[in-house]
Amino acid sequence: MSGHEGSNLFELGSWVVEKINHFQYTPGHMFFSSPTLTLGLSGGYLAVVGLLWLWMKDRKPFQLQYFTLVHNLIMTIASLIMFIGMTSSLLGLIFVRVTLKTTRNTNTLSPSLPTYKSSQRHNDWAEIMFCDTQKQEVNQGSLYFWVYVFFLSKFYEWLDTVLMVLKKVNPSVMAHYILLFLTQSH
């Protein structure tokens, strides 16, 4: 690889990171973000899996080891990427917020910045992880990018249920079927 190709790769990586960091979720305008579409697709998923289950009732199971292996490999890699993305985004938010509040608390940046009680500073990680009462992170930034990617991955996971039905993996199919439906139709 020449220096020029490495530079292009670095520029591409920087562009991707920039897009992720400045992600803006717009409900109703993004892929699968319409509640009507999501509920419709979820209903379709229930119907297709139910019909497939009835169709497979008197048939022999399909042998799909290689397809299942590739599918599981894709899901494993995607899950790892999403985990790393969400974790690094969350830790980045915590670091920035706690550092900013600590800096503001000591008034080293500017005397005009507000000060915070130490109890507010120590609970900031919980505020970021479980709620955003100040609406500073909602629908924007890298954390919400990864949440959106995770949401989209649930549609691909529907293939798990189809594979279970085709392979006649009976005991866990209904639980998986219901769990994915409930997850998707939140």
Image (spheres, grey):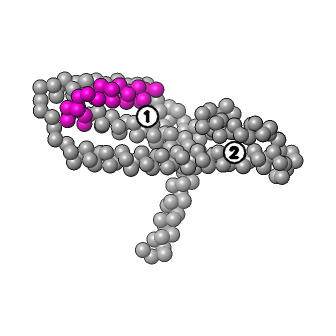
User: In terms of secondary structure, what is the magenta stretch mainly?
Assistant: helix
At 12% from the left and 29% from the top, the residue drawn is: 59
Q: Quadrant of the N terminus?
A: bottom left
Where residue 95 sits: x, y (%)? 66, 49
Q: Nearer the viewer, mark 1 or mark 2?
A: 2
Any part of residue 43 in sight: yes
Residue 32: mark in rendering: 1
Any part of residue 41 in sight: no
Mark 1 to mark 2: distance in Å?
31 Å
User: Toward which corner of the image does residue 44 lie, by quadrant?
Assistant: top left
Say above or below: 138 vs 142.
Answer: above
* Residue named by callout 2: 97
Say above or below: 88 vs 49.
Answer: below
Query: What amino acid type is highlighted by mark number 1?
Result: Phe
Where residue 22 sits: x, y (%)? 59, 48
At 47% from the left and 33% from the top, the residue drawn is: 33
Say above or below: 20 vs 179.
Answer: below
In this rendering, the count of numbered labels is 2
Residue stretch in magenta: 163-186
